[in-house]
Image (tube, grey):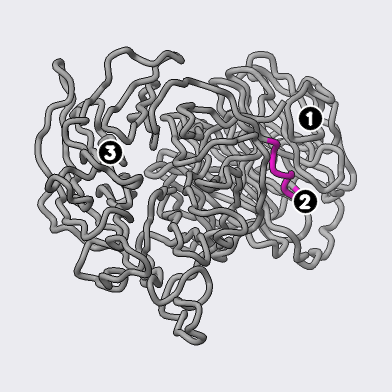
């Protein structure tokens, strides 16, 4: 490969530019099996789109010098580079040849002119160019060894990117901070820092917006990014759980987040009787629909199976209230190997007694269908309403069970603030061991639906008569009392009480007026699918009476909602629940017996 001399590259080093305070860099991933990108914006949402073909290598860079990093691909089979000047689906805006098959690409602003260009790493040697579209390197030098993984960053804040390497064989990262003293060809770059970084891959970016880049890692268990603002520190300043271990990381400044996408509904199946939940076992394409009357039915390839998966109708209360019956279903994380699943229902107590008992029961699936194994939780309900209903495995591996306060109006049984009673609380059950049940949180009126998203739980708590609310809290947050019946929404309860110590309780992240905007919040899920561009990371919810579809993005770092949206999707029936399949796609269930998938509008 020819080497051109760039005089400016060998001039005396300029004084480092002061670090500029600006917007932080973000992270993204590329799926080399499908050619799909997943870019995370500062509000926590992820934009997903296709650009490239299987086997391409991803890059981010500011190719048109507008301050925004956009996507590019290096096709290792032929050494061609394909650039786009926007982060969306489309064809390349430009392409050129640089390198040869098998080279590893790298991008950076090597001369500090505000425009990113290209480079390759080949068997311990870098070839960098300051001009896009050329196949000639301005600088080549030795740094690293065969098997190292290259990345780039402005590690001293002087406005110029330099190169770095991650060595998987020893879990070390090596960075440089000045390439100006190297000869045009054949020099050896000096290491400016060495850091231990155990990871699938190492990355660099300006995570705090202070003008200089620092290290980050893309790792497993859980898959995602750990980012530090000071090289060498052990504890991450930012963590983002996202992606899969075989996806390839990229970093850069992506600009302002795009608006929330338009949404619509697509009918999947109909003919159900009071469907109250939908879920799928991990890695299973089937969808299991829970009917309140006691049946669990299966949708496979868009067809509802003629025979129910599980029939519990004989256990249902004969004179059930609208809040009783079969209410929840959860599959064990290892259902594929152990066949375990769990149901949450209220059973018959005595003839004519509208009260009933809550049961959480373990079943094992097998050749003859699910067989009852054991009862995990049995709770006597003092009234016929506020039975909760959601069960879901949390990040701690425990099965979490939500129960309401026992019913009546205003918590007449005083269960909301009773930490020794599973009513008005979420209980964590160790289904795989012998640890005692844990009352994980209290102060809930009727947490009909909740969703564990990573280490955060999103709880839709149905209100009394003032406010419907959604709460978000970390699994190990020191405060897990949500305030009922001392407060409702953001205010005191009952409304006649003008002062209460709300500082003792977790405050809602969203609350809306009962009556004016709806009657009972229907908690949903954080969207973690990939089919709807710009929605990933958005929590969706509805209201049983109002039938709206609303959503928001929650920033774990600040504890605040960063963006909110509402979509008119034409629902005219009651909305009791959402559902989530094994791919993270979401569904709305309505009491007209229809299951509808949430899809991108248009």
Q: Residue furthest front?
A: 352
Q: CA distance from mark 3 to mark 2?
A: 70 Å
Looking at this view, is 547 or 460 the one in front? Answer: 547
Quadrant, the C terminus: top right
- Vertical position of residue 478 compared to residue 569: above or below: below
Q: CA distance from mark 1 to mark 2?
A: 29 Å
Residue 411 lies left or right of residue 31; in this view the side is left
Viewer-side label of 1, 3: 3
Q: Residues in magenta?
A: 255-262
Residue 119 lies left or right of residue 204; in this view the side is right
Q: Position of residue 304 (x, y in %)?
A: 39, 16
- Of the numbered discs 1 and 3, the one sitting upstream in the chain is 1
Q: Is disc 3 surrounded by few (<14), some (14 to 19) or many (20+) residues within 10 Å?
A: many
Which residue lies under the disc numbered 3? 326
Q: Is disc 2 surrounded by few (<14), some (14 to 19) or many (20+) residues within 10 Å?
A: some
Q: Residue furthest bottom?
A: 499
The stretch drawn in magenta includes residue 259:
yes
Q: CA distance from mark 1 to mark 3?
A: 51 Å
The stretch drawn in magenta includes residue 301:
no
Which residue lies under the disc numbered 1? 84
- Of the numbered discs 3 and 2, the one sitting upstream in the chain is 2
């Amino acid at each position: 490969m020819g080497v051109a001399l760039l005089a400016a590259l060998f001039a005396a080093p300029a004084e480092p530019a002061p670090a500029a305070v600006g917007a932080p860099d973000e992270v993204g991933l590329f799926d080399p099996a499908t050619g799909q990108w997943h870019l995370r914006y500062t509000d926590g949402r992820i934009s997903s789109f296709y650009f490239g073909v299987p086997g391409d290598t991803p890059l981010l860079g500011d190719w048109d010098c507008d301050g925004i990093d956009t996507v590019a691909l290096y096709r290792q089979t032929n050494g061609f580079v394909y650039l786009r000047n926007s982060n969306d689906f489309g064809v390349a805006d430009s392409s050129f040849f640089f390198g040869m098959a098998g080279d590893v690409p790298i991008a950076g602003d090597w001369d500090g002119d505000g425009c990113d260009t290209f480079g390759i790493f080949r068997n311990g040697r870098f070839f960098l160019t300051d001009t896009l579209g050329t196949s000639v390197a301005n600088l080549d030098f030795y740094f690293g060894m065969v098997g190292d993984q290259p990345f780039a960053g402005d590690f001293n804040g002087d406005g110029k990117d330099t190169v770095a390497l991650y060595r998987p064989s020893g879990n070390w990262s090596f960075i440089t901070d000045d390439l100006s003293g190297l000869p045009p060809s054949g020099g050896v770059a000096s290491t400016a820092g060495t850091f231990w970084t155990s990871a699938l891959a190492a990355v660099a970016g300006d995570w705090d917006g202070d003008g200089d880049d620092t290290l980050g890692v893309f790792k497993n268990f859980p898959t995602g990014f750990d980012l530090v603002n000071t090289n060498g520190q052990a504890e991450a300043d930012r963590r983002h759980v996202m992606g899969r271990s075989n996806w390839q990381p990229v970093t850069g400044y992506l600009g302002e987040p795009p608006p929330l996408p338009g949404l619509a509904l697509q009918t999947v199946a109909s003919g159900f009787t009071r469907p109250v939940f939908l879920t799928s076992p991990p890695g299973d394409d089937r969808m299991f629909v829970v009917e309140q009357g006691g049946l669990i039915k299966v949708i496979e390839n868009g067809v509802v199976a003629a025979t129910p998966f599980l029939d519990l109708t004989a256990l249902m209360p004969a004179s059930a209230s609208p809040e009783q019956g079969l209410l929840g279903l959860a599959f064990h994380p290892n259902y594929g190997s152990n066949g375990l699943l769990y149901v949450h229902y209220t059973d018959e107590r005595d003839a004519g007694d509208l009260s009933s008992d809550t049961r959480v029961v373990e079943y094992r699936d097998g050749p003859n269908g699910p067989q009852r194994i054991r009862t995990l939780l049995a709770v006597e309900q003092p009234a016929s309403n506020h039975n909760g209903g959601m069960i879901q495995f949390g990040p701690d591996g425990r099965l979490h069970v939500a129960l309401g306060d026992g019913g009546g109006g205003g918590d007449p049984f005083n269960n909301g603030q009773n930490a020794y009673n599973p009513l008005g609380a979420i209980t964590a059950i160790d289904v795989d061991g012998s640890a005692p049940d844990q009352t994980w949180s209290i102060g809930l009126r009727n947490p009909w639906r909740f969703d564990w998203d990573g280490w955060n739980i999103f709880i839709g708590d149905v209100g009394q008569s003032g406010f419907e609310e959604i709460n978000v809290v970390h699994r190990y947050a020191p405060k897990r009392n949500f305030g009922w019946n001392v407060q409702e929404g953001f205010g005191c309860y009952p409304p006649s009480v003008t002062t209460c110590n709300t500082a003792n309780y977790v405050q809602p992240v969203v609350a809306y007026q009962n009556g004016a905007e709806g009657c009972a919040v229907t908690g949903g899920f954080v969207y973690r699918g990939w089919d709807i561009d710009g929605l990933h990371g958005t929590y969706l919810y509805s209201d049983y009476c109002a039938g709206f579809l609303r959503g928001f993005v929650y920033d774990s770092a600040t504890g605040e909602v960063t963006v909110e949206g509402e979509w008119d999707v034409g629902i005219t029936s009651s909305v009791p629940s959402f559902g989530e399949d094994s791919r993270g796609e979401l569904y709305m269930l309505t009491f007209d017996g229809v299951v509808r998938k949430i899809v991108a509008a248009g």
